Amino acid sequence: METDQKDQTPEMQESPQETPQTDPQRLPRRMRRKKGFRMPQPAAPVKAIWKSASPEEQKSAHQKAILVLEHWMGRMNRKELAEKLGIPQVRVWQLAQSALSGMVSGLLKQPKNPPPGTTLLPEENPKLLKKRIEDLEHQNKLLTGLIGVLRDLPAAREALAEVEPEARKGKKNQPPRRTDQDQD
Protein backbone atom coordinates (compact mmCIF):
# COMPACT_ATOMS: atom_id res chain seq x y z
CA MET A 1 0.00 0.00 0.00
CA GLU A 2 1.45 3.24 -1.17
CA THR A 3 1.04 6.50 0.60
CA ASP A 4 0.86 9.80 -1.15
CA GLN A 5 2.99 12.66 -0.05
CA LYS A 6 -0.18 14.44 0.94
CA ASP A 7 -0.96 11.77 3.51
CA GLN A 8 2.47 12.04 5.14
CA THR A 9 3.21 14.26 8.06
CA PRO A 10 5.68 17.12 7.55
CA GLU A 11 8.47 15.23 9.37
CA MET A 12 8.05 12.29 7.03
CA GLN A 13 8.13 14.48 3.94
CA GLU A 14 11.33 16.27 4.90
CA SER A 15 13.46 13.24 5.69
CA PRO A 16 13.27 10.34 3.29
CA GLN A 17 13.76 6.93 4.83
CA GLU A 18 17.47 6.28 5.29
CA THR A 19 19.18 3.02 5.96
CA PRO A 20 20.76 3.25 9.36
CA GLN A 21 24.55 3.27 9.03
CA THR A 22 26.38 1.80 11.94
CA ASP A 23 29.32 3.76 13.20
CA PRO A 24 32.19 1.45 14.17
CA GLN A 25 32.99 3.67 17.14
CA ARG A 26 29.50 3.07 18.56
CA LEU A 27 29.66 -0.73 18.28
CA PRO A 28 30.69 -2.69 21.32
CA ARG A 29 34.36 -3.60 21.25
CA ARG A 30 33.72 -7.29 20.69
CA MET A 31 31.76 -6.51 17.52
CA ARG A 32 34.30 -4.19 15.92
CA ARG A 33 36.41 -5.54 13.15
CA LYS A 34 40.12 -5.92 13.79
CA LYS A 35 42.19 -3.60 11.64
CA GLY A 36 44.90 -6.01 10.57
CA PHE A 37 47.50 -8.21 12.09
CA ARG A 38 49.28 -6.77 15.09
CA MET A 39 52.74 -8.22 15.64
CA PRO A 40 54.04 -8.58 19.15
CA GLN A 41 57.03 -6.34 19.76
CA PRO A 42 60.19 -8.16 18.68
CA ALA A 43 62.72 -9.07 21.29
CA ALA A 44 66.29 -7.85 21.65
CA PRO A 45 68.82 -9.10 19.08
CA VAL A 46 68.36 -12.84 18.96
CA LYS A 47 72.00 -13.72 18.36
CA ALA A 48 73.12 -11.82 21.45
CA ILE A 49 70.47 -13.53 23.57
CA TRP A 50 71.45 -16.94 22.19
CA LYS A 51 75.17 -16.38 22.86
CA SER A 52 74.53 -15.14 26.39
CA ALA A 53 72.47 -18.24 27.27
CA SER A 54 74.09 -21.24 28.92
CA PRO A 55 74.25 -24.55 26.99
CA GLU A 56 71.51 -25.98 29.22
CA GLU A 57 69.23 -23.03 28.44
CA GLN A 58 69.97 -23.40 24.72
CA LYS A 59 69.08 -27.10 24.84
CA SER A 60 65.87 -26.37 26.75
CA ALA A 61 64.88 -23.66 24.25
CA HIS A 62 65.55 -26.06 21.37
CA GLN A 63 63.28 -28.70 22.94
CA LYS A 64 60.53 -26.11 23.50
CA ALA A 65 60.83 -25.03 19.86
CA ILE A 66 60.35 -28.61 18.70
CA LEU A 67 57.25 -28.98 20.89
CA VAL A 68 55.77 -25.65 19.70
CA LEU A 69 56.29 -26.73 16.08
CA GLU A 70 54.50 -30.02 16.82
CA HIS A 71 51.64 -27.97 18.28
CA TRP A 72 51.49 -25.77 15.18
CA MET A 73 51.48 -28.81 12.90
CA GLY A 74 48.55 -30.26 14.83
CA ARG A 75 50.32 -33.26 16.33
CA MET A 76 49.34 -32.14 19.83
CA ASN A 77 46.85 -29.70 21.24
CA ARG A 78 47.50 -26.82 23.62
CA LYS A 79 46.53 -28.81 26.68
CA GLU A 80 48.98 -31.64 25.87
CA LEU A 81 51.74 -29.14 25.21
CA ALA A 82 51.05 -27.37 28.51
CA GLU A 83 51.26 -30.72 30.33
CA LYS A 84 54.56 -31.66 28.65
CA LEU A 85 56.12 -28.30 29.47
CA GLY A 86 54.52 -28.10 32.91
CA ILE A 87 53.12 -24.60 32.33
CA PRO A 88 49.59 -23.10 32.10
CA GLN A 89 47.79 -23.04 28.74
CA VAL A 90 47.92 -19.24 28.62
CA ARG A 91 51.71 -19.40 28.86
CA VAL A 92 51.70 -21.85 25.90
CA TRP A 93 49.90 -19.22 23.85
CA GLN A 94 52.45 -16.59 24.95
CA LEU A 95 55.34 -18.87 23.97
CA ALA A 96 53.75 -19.48 20.58
CA GLN A 97 53.35 -15.72 20.03
CA SER A 98 56.95 -15.10 21.02
CA ALA A 99 58.12 -17.89 18.69
CA LEU A 100 56.06 -16.43 15.85
CA SER A 101 57.53 -12.98 16.47
CA GLY A 102 61.05 -14.39 16.32
CA MET A 103 60.33 -16.34 13.17
CA VAL A 104 58.79 -13.35 11.39
CA SER A 105 61.70 -11.12 12.46
CA GLY A 106 64.15 -13.69 11.17
CA LEU A 107 62.44 -13.74 7.79
CA LEU A 108 62.72 -9.98 7.32
CA LYS A 109 65.44 -8.58 5.11
CA GLN A 110 68.28 -7.96 7.50
CA PRO A 111 69.64 -4.39 7.56
CA LYS A 112 73.25 -3.68 6.68
CA ASN A 113 73.77 -1.80 9.92
CA PRO A 114 72.02 -2.77 13.13
CA PRO A 115 69.18 -0.53 14.30
CA PRO A 116 70.08 2.27 16.71
CA GLY A 117 70.29 1.22 20.32
CA THR A 118 71.50 -2.29 19.47
CA THR A 119 74.59 -3.24 21.35
CA LEU A 120 77.03 -5.45 19.51
CA LEU A 121 79.76 -7.56 20.97
CA PRO A 122 83.19 -5.95 20.39
CA GLU A 123 84.26 -8.77 18.08
CA GLU A 124 81.16 -8.21 15.90
CA ASN A 125 81.14 -4.41 15.66
CA PRO A 126 82.13 -3.48 12.07
CA LYS A 127 83.62 -0.11 13.04
CA LEU A 128 85.85 -1.66 15.69
CA LEU A 129 86.85 -4.46 13.32
CA LYS A 130 87.86 -1.97 10.59
CA LYS A 131 89.92 0.00 13.11
CA ARG A 132 91.59 -3.22 14.27
CA ILE A 133 92.43 -4.17 10.66
CA GLU A 134 93.96 -0.74 10.04
CA ASP A 135 96.08 -1.04 13.22
CA LEU A 136 97.27 -4.52 12.26
CA GLU A 137 98.12 -3.45 8.70
CA HIS A 138 100.12 -0.50 10.07
CA GLN A 139 101.93 -2.77 12.54
CA ASN A 140 102.64 -5.29 9.75
CA LYS A 141 104.12 -2.53 7.57
CA LEU A 142 106.39 -1.34 10.42
CA LEU A 143 107.58 -4.87 11.21
CA THR A 144 108.26 -5.61 7.53
CA GLY A 145 110.37 -2.45 7.34
CA LEU A 146 112.22 -3.43 10.53
CA ILE A 147 112.98 -6.89 9.14
CA GLY A 148 114.38 -5.25 5.98
CA VAL A 149 116.63 -2.98 8.06
CA LEU A 150 117.85 -5.90 10.17
CA ARG A 151 118.70 -7.93 7.07
CA ASP A 152 120.85 -5.07 5.76
CA LEU A 153 123.03 -4.99 8.90
CA PRO A 154 126.53 -6.50 8.45
CA ALA A 155 126.07 -9.03 11.27
CA ALA A 156 122.85 -10.23 9.70
CA ARG A 157 124.58 -10.64 6.32
CA GLU A 158 127.24 -12.85 7.87
CA ALA A 159 124.65 -14.97 9.69
CA LEU A 160 122.64 -15.25 6.50
CA ALA A 161 125.76 -16.29 4.55
CA GLU A 162 126.40 -19.08 7.07
CA VAL A 163 122.82 -20.31 6.90
CA GLU A 164 122.61 -20.40 3.10
CA PRO A 165 125.32 -23.07 2.55
CA GLU A 166 123.71 -25.26 5.23
CA ALA A 167 120.39 -24.92 3.46
CA ARG A 168 122.05 -25.92 0.20
CA LYS A 169 123.65 -28.99 1.77
CA GLY A 170 120.25 -30.56 2.20
CA LYS A 171 119.59 -30.13 -1.49
CA LYS A 172 122.81 -31.99 -2.46
CA ASN A 173 121.44 -35.25 -1.10
CA GLN A 174 118.37 -35.02 -3.33
CA PRO A 175 118.54 -36.52 -6.83
CA PRO A 176 118.89 -33.91 -9.60
CA ARG A 177 115.72 -32.71 -11.23
CA ARG A 178 114.91 -34.06 -14.62
CA THR A 179 114.28 -31.42 -17.22
CA ASP A 180 112.87 -31.69 -20.73
CA GLN A 181 116.39 -31.65 -22.16
CA ASP A 182 117.38 -34.69 -20.06
CA GLN A 183 114.52 -36.75 -21.47
CA ASP A 184 115.79 -36.42 -25.10
Image: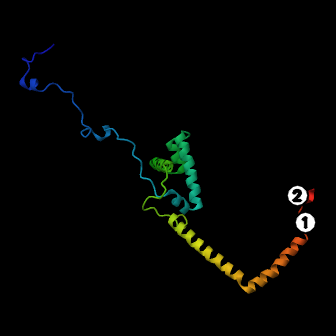
Task: Find residue 13 and report its horizontal and vertical position in percent.
Answer: 9, 23
Q: Is residue 125 visible?
A: no
Residue occupying image coordinates x 57% and y 57%? 58
Q: CA distance from mark 2 to mark 1?
A: 13 Å
Question: On residue 176, which mark appears?
Answer: 1
Vertical side of 52 occupied by 36: above or below: above
In the displayed image of the protein, which residue is found farthest to the top? 1
Q: Which mark is residue 105?
A: none
Horizontal and vertical percent position of residue 111? 48, 54
Q: Choose between 136 and 150: the one closer to the eye.
A: 150
Local secondary structure at mark 2: helix
Residue at image position (54%, 40%) is: 73
Q: Which mark is residue 180?
A: 2
Of the pair 122 and 148, the residue shown nearer to us: 148
**Is residue 58 visible from the viewing direction of this image?**
yes
Amino acid of disc 1: Pro
Describe the element under mark 1 as helix, strand or loop.
Answer: loop
Mark 2 residue crowding within 10 angstroms, few (<14) / some (14–19) / many (20+): few
Question: Does the CB distance between marks 2 and 1 fall below 8 Å?
Answer: no
- In the picture, the quarter occupied by the N terminus is top left
Indicate the position of residue 2 as horizontal and vertical percent values.
14, 14
Q: How was this image coloured?
A: rainbow
In the rendered view of the protein, which quadrant contains the C terminus? bottom right
What is the three-letter code of the residue carrying label 2? Asp
Instruction: Answer few, some or many: residues within 10 Å of disc 1's Cα (few below 14, many 20 plus, some between 14 and 19).
Output: few
Give the quadrant of residue 76. Answer: top right
- Residue in the foreground of this view, choosing between 143 and 151: 151
Q: Residue at x 51, y 50 (%)?
A: 106
